[in-house]
Structure formats: structure tokens, C-alpha cells
Image (cartoon, grey):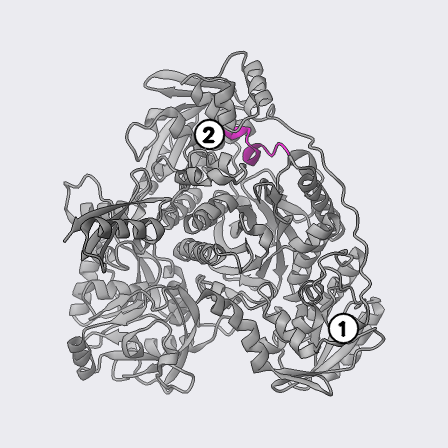
Amino acid sequence: MLVNEKVAIEHGLKAEEYRKICDLLKRVPNITELGIFSAMWNEHCSYKSSRLHLKKLHTKGKKVIQGPGENAGVIDIEDGDAIVFKIESHNHPSFIEPYQGAATGVGGIMRDVFTMGARPIANLNSIHFGSPQNKKTKNLLRGVVHGIGGYGNCMGVPTIGGQTSFDSSYNGNILVNAMTLGLVKKNKIFYSKAAGLNKPVIYVGSKTGRDGIHGASMASANFDEKIEEKKPTVQVGDPFTEKLLLEACLELMSGDSIIAIQDMGAAGLTSSSIEMASKGNLGIEINLNKVPCRETKMTPYEIMLSESQERMLIVLENGKEDLAKKIFDKWNLDFAVIGKTTNSKNIELFFNEKQIANIPINILVEKSPMYDRKWKKSKLPKKNRFKKNIFSNLKIKDVLKKIISNPNICSKEWIWQQYDHTVMGDTIQKPGGDSGVIRVHGTDKAVAATVDSSAVYCWAHPLTGGKQVVAESWRNLISVGATPIAITNCLNFGSPENEDNMGEFVECVEGISEASKYLNFPVVSGNVSFYNQTKEMGIKPTPSIGGVGLIKNYKKMMTMDFKDIDNLVLIIGKTEGHLDQSLFARIILDEKNGPPPEVNLFNEKNNGISLLDLIEKDLIKSAHDISLGGILTALTKMCIKGNKGIKLNKPKNLINGFSYFFAEDQGRYIIEIEPKKLKEVNKILDKNSVHHEEIGVIIKNDMIIDEKTKVTIDELKSYNTNWLRNFMN
Amino acid sequence: MKSSVITFPGSNCDRDMDVALKKFGFNNKMVWHDDIELPKSDLVVLPGGFSYGDYLRCGSMASKSKIMQSVINFAKSGGLVMGICNGFQILVESGLVPGVLLRNKYLEFICKNVFVKINNKDNPYFKNLNKEVFELHIAHNEGNYFCTRDQLKEIEDNNQIAIYYCNDNGETKEISNPNGSINNIAGIFNKEKNVLGMMPHPERMIDQSLSGEDGSIFFKNLINNIK
Amino acid sequence: MKISAIITLKKDVLDPQGKVIHKTLDGMGFKDVNGVRQGKYFEIDVNENDPTKARGLVEDMCKKLLTNLVIENYKIIETQ
């Protein structure tokens, strides 16, 4: 096939990018080479619109062993142990084929983690769907949940947490972000940097088929009417093969045969081979006839761009081929020596004894386009002045019922009961808490993990929203008694070619950076997903933050369920009554404008560290952070989980109960303490200048809000749990 | 006491079972599906997981693996063989226990704590237990036990039903049936009661910090019974 | 009348089940198998006696529900 500008544009390249390729090569590329360029210069692989801004992220810290740029980030959890983790999007494939899209998303992120030598020990996910009224939502949700479960359950890795939201901005473009944590010994981490000349390049795993050719390009294409035509590019996942691949890789990794290893994810053999060579500043030679193929008559173009799943590329030490082959034979996986490292600094491909591609690797990587896209700064919206009379017709009980049965607040038990969350025998906090917690097998340590996003806040003011998501992740870790260590981010945005969407991206990144720096909560891995939109409308900006923390003694882990009657309930952090952008304002007052709650990083840090201190000193019985839905929502969840009631004190010095109970001011937690500990708790909080107030006392069965308002916990529970079950059945 | 846990390609509760058996005093060995001989054992366990990806029918392909002939011979000679979850499915497919395990009634994978009631204590697994109702954990997609009416009668006549799903008071009502199993059956024996297949995972309930500790009671009793 | 439909994975779509079944058969001694692809079979009894119309009806069901057209093909195989 002849290559020209038109063909290049069909490959998703811009005309000027095509001209740049011809200039750099000093010739016209052939079709295989063009395919390679289109994959490597694609937004998904090259980060051409985001690179400039991602540099601003805070990525360093004492506990960081590996920051962004590898298959996943790595943090130190002491005693020679490390946690490898990352979050990644699989949005577009999941919209087209929800089961397979979500399944292969989970498979891909697990490969990223075990590529580094870590055994996956926990999965989480952040999934976002269109409005429940949208006729596609139900099937997409069901398909995605089945897909995530189908893959993760089969792999035998517990899914310990996640987040699900509904918003009409995702009607035509759902989000599926999957996160995996793996455990590795610090001295047994594997990287993707090739080293040494004439080292054998090994292909292992499944055979190559015509799956997902141009998947990486699809991930960066707008969804339009022609979406049907894009269907055949969706890959089918095979978790069984991945389980074998995991065991085989870990078996090989226990020795010293591997120089470098990289999974074949987006843009398959192309990006994996080029990345390994590029990092090692080497060339690579591949004989495509040696690549195990599933279909007959596959062309070099198809072999290079296939996104068949469950494959790995390894650079081995010389002479270790037989040993490695024996392991992969045992696990019934394909194994082939397909090439070697060279000193040419080019990627050279051979097929039927002819050289069919020869490209300098630096052109593909360092010379890839980088854009400083135009972006628009967002103004902080003006605050609403809610008049007193709009509250006068509201009954607090009705409001509470409406809020706790809202799709974005209600219990997601229907979802997480379909995920195996207890396999591996170390899950000590199941989904439904502030963070999922797993023990580090055979030790006293535990690792906590959470995924969060607040698209509404980010949409209202991206800078504040970006900060808020990081703060929320931090709070969710603190609430279970974990010391926050680091985060991974999955940045889901609209088109970078749209100034508003690009502005949202830039300012969210700034917010994330500012908060993570202040909280010493660095970003160690992540990915960017642009072009999340249908036609011209971008989704609400949705950075998903995956936070990881450490609990040194797992017996000190905190949970949110109320424990004992007569215990006192306190609020840490000040309630200012910020209603704008709260769930209350949006669904009860129908007010969608206004600024999100302010994030005061000093208070976040101070309140969080003070709470950790209280937990460490065994002074509290339960803890929960206050987020979406405010104080009363948080209390309701604590009551339901503990099957206890609460008698509330009359709130002091605020305009009305609604702004007290439903405001979404940041930096707040609810804690339960024994009455005899009150003095000591007060002393510590006062000493640290942490605002705190007593809000009530734990009783049996009922929530008593004031003299006139009483509601049973059973009733609250049915409101909270029924919505999703009813919606899905 | 010696035990063996068989690892099939796709097994994923093999390590958990190994941890549990060792915790309660078994000298456990892991055995690869492709091996022909079984090490000398007092107990053989087929663990949970997704052997062969659960493709075709759960357990169908694992039941044809090399080691299974030895397991079958071991069972026929009276050796104790216990299959948990996928292991139960493999037992069914290899004909060591009667019936089949269909897809869950609501067509969804289900992972949660359940209560089970022990039906028959006249066997090495449950003998001497001083408790009727256990809280265990299930995690499966195909645990809906089914057999023909004639088979059911035979199973009942031979007292082969091991455990029923029930509520915390031990009542075996439909509402406590998580997957549609016939008569709330959660586990069954072979005729001789030396082979036990059950869906719940006792190995996930061996620690106060996990979902509960009823699994500990089961394992402690089991090793005492075998001694 | 009764119409049957067979749903199979499209030619180039990976069939993990077929692959594993093939390997197991091989292990059991069935050495002459070149490949296995699996699918679903439906027998649908429709309230329609015109064969062409009945086929059309089932074809519509295949398109709208029975088949995942992203990865599967359908074939209407028999009319009784």
C-alpha cells in the first residue's frame, strides 16, 4: 500500500505530523513504518498534549523507589518490602464492548504490575456511567461489573475497593479506570530498560491475533456516529492465560535471567520493543516470522500493531533461553526468541528474510510531537446566597432519605459482592469502607488503598477540584489508620484540542500537584485519557486518584462502623456550612452553580495527622471522613455499618440545620470515643489547634436528629441499599 | 498429619489452603496437576479457583488431568478427599460425588459470608464438632447444586448431604439460599463419606481479622479427627 | 415453527475456551485435532408459520439480543 498524507491522516496523524515524519526519515515511510509512527505518536503513547503539564506533578519523596515513567510506580513499605501500583483507563473499549473492555483493562493493569516482579495483591476500580435514566446505562454497568469480576476473580486477586458514579456527562463515554497493587521485595524489582548487546529478545504468552489493531489510536479518537465501524478492534481477554503468565513470569523472575521486561499493552509489540530499546539507548532487531501468530497470513503491519492480550517481551541474559523456555512450557505458554538487542539505535524489522522497516528509535520517542495546547483559565464561580425561605418547606428526614438513596451515595454492595474480595486470605477491610485494607502476607503490616474522584468539584473549579481529590484520598487512608504514602492518577478529560477541556486538564493537574506536594503525597504513576466525549461535549473533568498508605500494625486498623452504645461522637474539622456544589444543593435545591468547597491544605494536614495520632494512641473506636452528602450522610453510614443509632446534639451557631448537616466543607472526620477518653482526646486536639465538637451519643436502633425527628436505622438502611439493587433488577 | 493440595492451572486458592492447613498442624505438600503420583497423604484437597479458566464447564478439564487418576484411586481406597468451591466442581466432574453445579440462580458471581448448618456428623470431617451452625464465606459463580429427583432421594437416603445454607439460627429457608441450590445444599459427601465437596471456603475464615473464625474450628477439629 | 441459530465468535476473535478445550483434548490423546472453536446454539419456537418471516424474526433477535455483534457472528441453520 502506498503511503501518502491521506493514508497518514486515516491513521490518526495530523498532516504536519506526517510531514515531520518524512523530514526526520528523509524519505516516505512504508505502511508498516507509518503504522508504527501512528502508534508511537498517538496521544495515548506519546502524551503529546499532556507531557508539558505532567512535568509539574510532584513525584519525589523519601518513600518513592520508582516514580512515573516505568510500567508502574514503586514505594517503600519498610523491612525490604515494596508496593508496586498504578491506575489506568480503559474507557473507549469499555463503551464499545463493556465486558471485554473492562476485563482487558483489569488484565492490562495487572500485567503492568507483575511485569515489575510484584505479585498483584489487590485490585480497585473507578467506574463512571451516564445518568441512570439513559437507556444504555444499565447494560453498560452490568457489562463492566461482570467484566471486572470475570477477569479479577479468575486471576485470584481480591478487588478491595472502588468508586462508582453516575452523571449525564458520561452518557456517551463511560469511564473505566482499573488499579492494581502488587507486593515485591525491594531488591527484586524488574524494569523495562534493556542493557547489553546481542541479548536475546523473547516473546512469551498468548499468540498474536488481529485483536485491537489500532486500539491505541481508538483510545484517542472522538466518539462519533461511526462508532459501529470501530467495533472489530476490541480485544478479548483471557484471564486464564494471564494467570499462567503471572505464575510463569514470577517463576522466571525468582532467578537472574531477566535483563528487562515489558508487557505488550497499547500498541503491542511496537511500543514494548521500542520502549525497552529506547530506555537502554540501544537498537533492536526483530524477525517477525518468529512471532507466534494465531491467524494465518498475518502481515508485518498487523503483527506490529496487534493488541492481543496476555503477552510479554523480555530481554534475557545470553544462555538462559533453555531455562526460560522450560518454565513457559510448563505453564503451557508460547515462547519464542524473536530478535536481539543491537548497537544500531534503530528498530529493524525483518519478514521473509527482507528488512521491512528501519527507523531510528530516537525519532519515534524523543522527537515525537509535544504540544503546548491553548487552554482557558477557569474563574472561581460566585457563591450562592441561599435565602432562608427555600429551606422552610424542607423536612430533614425526607432530605436525608433522598440523599442516601441517591445513585452517587447509595450502597454499591450489588457491585462489590460480584468481585471476589477475600481471596488470598489477607483482606481485613472489605469494600464499602473508607479504604480497602490488605495485610502484607505473613507480617504485622497492612496496606490501605482507595480510589477517589470528584468530577463535580473539578467541573466547577478545576484547580480546587484537583486539590480536593488528593485531599479526599488522603482522608480516606487516614480514616482507616493508614499513613498516606503516595498516589497514582488517571486523568480522564475531554479533548485537548478544546481550550475549555484543556484548561480543565491543566488546572486539575496544578491542583493535584499543589496538594500532593503540601501533603507529601507524591504521584508515582498514572495515565492520561483524553478525548472522552461524544460529539463536541467533553465529560466532566474526572481525575481519578488512587491513594496507598501503610498501617504498621494491622491490629490498629480503624473502621467506620459504630461500636458501642453510650460512646460519644465527635466531629474533627470545622463546619462552615458550604453548600455550593454539595449533593444537597444539586439535588434538593436544584442549584448547579457556585464554587466547590475550599480546600485548606494546612487544616487537611493538621487534622489528618492529629487523627492518626489519636488512632495510634488507641483513643478512638471508629472513624469516617465527611465527604459527599455531609455530616448526616457520613453518620448514617456509620450507623448502618455498626447497626447502632445516634442521638444528635443541637448544632450550635449556624444559620440552619440543613447547612450544618449537609455542607461539604473539607478536612473533616467523624470519630467515636469512649466517654472516659473524652478529656484526653480534647487535650490532644486542642494542643494541635484542631477544631472539634461533640455531635452526639450512640444509642440503639434510631437516629434522633431533634425532638421531632426520629428515623430507624433499618429504614435508613433500606433506603441506602435498595436503589442500586432495584435499578439493576 | 500429611496433606496434599493439588494445583491445577488456574487454581487460585491453593496457597490460601496451604496456609490454613499448615496453621492447624498439617504437614502440607503442593502437588502439580501434571504429576502422576500422589505423595503419601492423610488428606487430599482440591482447592478453589478457576482451573482451566472455568472454560467449557467448571472443573471439567481439571477432572481429566493426570493427577486425578491417582486422586480417584486414593478416594476409592477410602482416603479423605476434600474439594472446596472449584475443587467441589472438579469432584462432581470426576464422578467422585453425585450431581452438578450450575450457574448461580441470579447469574452473578457472589462473594459474601453465609451460614451453613451441618447435616451429618457421622464422618471424619464433622465428627466431634460441638456446634451446628457455621459462618463461612462463599465466592463463586457456579455453586447452584443440582441433581435429579432420584439422585436426590438416594443422596438423602444415604445421608450424603453434608451442609445446608441457612440463617444464623440454622433455619434452611429459601431466603438463605444464595445461589438457587436444590434444597439449600451447600456440600455433599460420597456414599462412603470420605469424599467431601462444598462451596464455602473454610480457609478464608481462619483469623479474627478476616471475615471470621469458624474456619479455624473446622480445621482444628479435622486434624484431631484424623490423628 | 422452530428456528435454530448458531452463534460463533468471529473468525479473528480469540476464543480462549476453544483454545483450552483443544489443549485438553490433545492431552487426553485426541491428537488429530487442528482447532476448536466454541459457540452457542439456540432453538427458538416462534408463533409464525411462514418460513421466511420466521427466519426474519429470528434474524432480528440475533441482531438485537442473541449475538454480540462486536465479537460474534450468527448463522440461522435450520427451518422446520
Mark seen at residue A391: 1
Displayed quadrant of residue A13: top right
In the rendered image, which quarter contains the C terminus of chain A?
Answer: bottom left
Indicate left or right for A546 with A374 as reference.
Answer: left
Query: In the image shown, does B212 or A266 lie closer to the viewer?
Result: A266
Q: Chain of mark 2?
A: A
Task: Indicate the position of residue A29 as horizontal and vertical percent values.
Answer: 48, 17
State the residue at coordinates (36%, 76%): B177
Report which residue position mark 2 lands on: A270
The boundaries of the magenta stretch are: A39-49
- As measured in the structure, the alpha-carbon distance from the residue carrying label 1 to the one carrying label 2 is 60 Å
Q: Is residue A110 visible?
A: no
Q: Tell me which numbered mark, 1 or 2, is placed earlier along the sequence.
A: 2
Are discs 1 and 2 less than 8 Å apart at CB? no
Vertical comparison of A220 with A346: above or below: below
In the rendered image, which quarter contains the N terminus of chain A?
Answer: top left
Q: Amino acid at mark 1?
A: Phe
Q: Identify the element where label 1 is drawn.
A: helix
Q: Residues within 10 Å of mark 2 (few under 14, many from 20)?
A: many
Q: Nearer the viewer, mark 1 or mark 2?
A: 1
Displayed quadrant of residue A714: bottom right
Task: Indicate the position of residue B118 as horizontal and vertical percent values.
Answer: 32, 82
Displayed quadrant of residue A698: bottom right
Residue situated furthest top in the rendering: A26
Q: Amino acid at mark 2?
A: Thr
Q: Identify the element where label 2 is drawn.
A: helix
Q: Residues within 10 Å of mark 1 (few under 14, many from 20)?
A: some
Task: Indicate the position of residue A693 as horizontal and vertical percent values.
Answer: 79, 75
Query: In the image shown, does A87 or A298 lie closer to the viewer?
Result: A298
Vertical comparison of A287 with A526: above or below: above
Query: In the image shown, does C51 or B177 lie closer to the viewer?
Result: C51
